[in-house]
Amino acid sequence: MSPEKLPEPLRIAYSPCPNDTFVFDAWAHGRVPGAPALDVTFADIDITNGMAERGESDVLKVSYAVLPYVLDEYALLPCGGALGRGCGPLVLTREAGADLAGRTVAVPSETSTAYLLFRLWAADTVPGGVGEIVVMPFHEIMPAVRDGKVDAGLVIHEARFTYQNYGLHKLADLGEHWELTTGLPIPLGAIIARRSLGQERLTELAAATRASVRAAWDDPEASRPYVLAHAQEMDPAVADQHIGLYVNEFTADLGEDGYAAVRGLLTRAAAEGLVPPLGPDALRFP
């Protein structure tokens, strides 16, 4: 009699950033009872956005900005993602208080929440709009602004703390602008799962994600080896700060404010012609 065939692992793709490895550590290492085994692919979010658009995985961490392009095939899970406050992208210039009307702006991606926040800010504050948008690797943006190759740069993450080293000025904090104008958290990264898995399986995946988050909170030290192994030489204290900023109550459950933030961002972006409009039930789970 042949042995019973084990079910195929669930294909999942998320970033090596501390918040993602912290969230999924317990599940990835078999410490969530009843959860399916995972086949993990590590990739930065610009890569996972493309994977989602091509339908290349069962579960993915993606930018909220890509949702309008993938929600026919994938459902937004109500947990596991990243929303936050005080953690938005910045617009940097060489001169303090520069006017960006008609100017060239470097951005790391045009399929990111940061880019949507930038365009919404510009629609509110730059009469006539900005000029050419140039996509370039994140690490090249601040040197390009410093050297006069572009007039301004859109930056994220650790650049919040290092831009002064390039002699640059903060023209705008886009997260601050978003929070002041909406009162809502900043939607950053979402967890999505393939709709073809079926309603029951999707519900199980959401439960497993929540259980993994709670396990990480209950025993933070258990996740530390996994987090630091993938944190790309990040100082452990910085990794802890990263987790503290991006893993919060919205990670356990989007809740009313979380859903309002996501719908608000994508509705405003659609009104500016930046993304396709969402259907009325597009964010419903499952």
Image: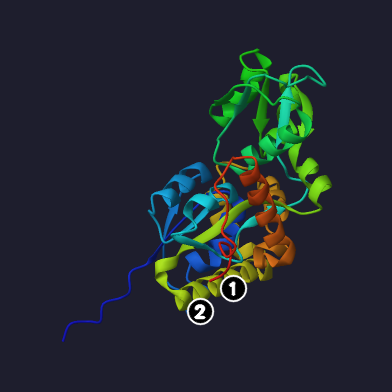
Where residue 226 sits, quadrant-wise, is bottom right
Please, is residue 90 above or below residue 97 in the view? below
- Estimate the x, y position of residue 197 in percent, counting from the top left: 41, 70
- Crowd around label 2: few <14 · some 14–19 · many ≥20 (10 Å): few
- Estimate the x, y position of residue 148 in percent, counting from the top left: 65, 12
Please, is residue 284 above or below residue 82 in the view? below
Q: Horizontal placement of 116 versus 41: left or right?
A: right
Q: Residue at left 78%, top 27%? A: 171
Q: Which mark is residue 153?
A: none
Viewer-side residue, 87 vs 32? 87
Residue 37 visible within the image? no
Q: Which mark is residue 211?
A: 1
Kind of residue at badge 1:
Ala
Residue lying at the far left in this picture: please name it.
1
Q: Horizontal placement of 133 versus 87: left or right?
A: left
Kind of residue at badge 2:
Pro
Q: Residue at left 60%, top 59%? A: 22
First in sequence: mark 2 or mark 1? 2
Q: Are marks 2 and 1 in contact (CB under 8 Å)?
A: yes
Render colour scheme: rainbow
Residue 96 visible within the image? yes
Where residue 174 sits, quadrant-wise, is top right
Q: Secondary structure at mark 2?
A: loop
Residue on which disc 2 sits: 33
Viewer-side residue, 77 vs 166? 77
- Estimate the x, y position of residue 161 in percent, counting from the top left: 74, 34
- Looking at the rendered image, the quarter that the N terminus falls into is bottom left
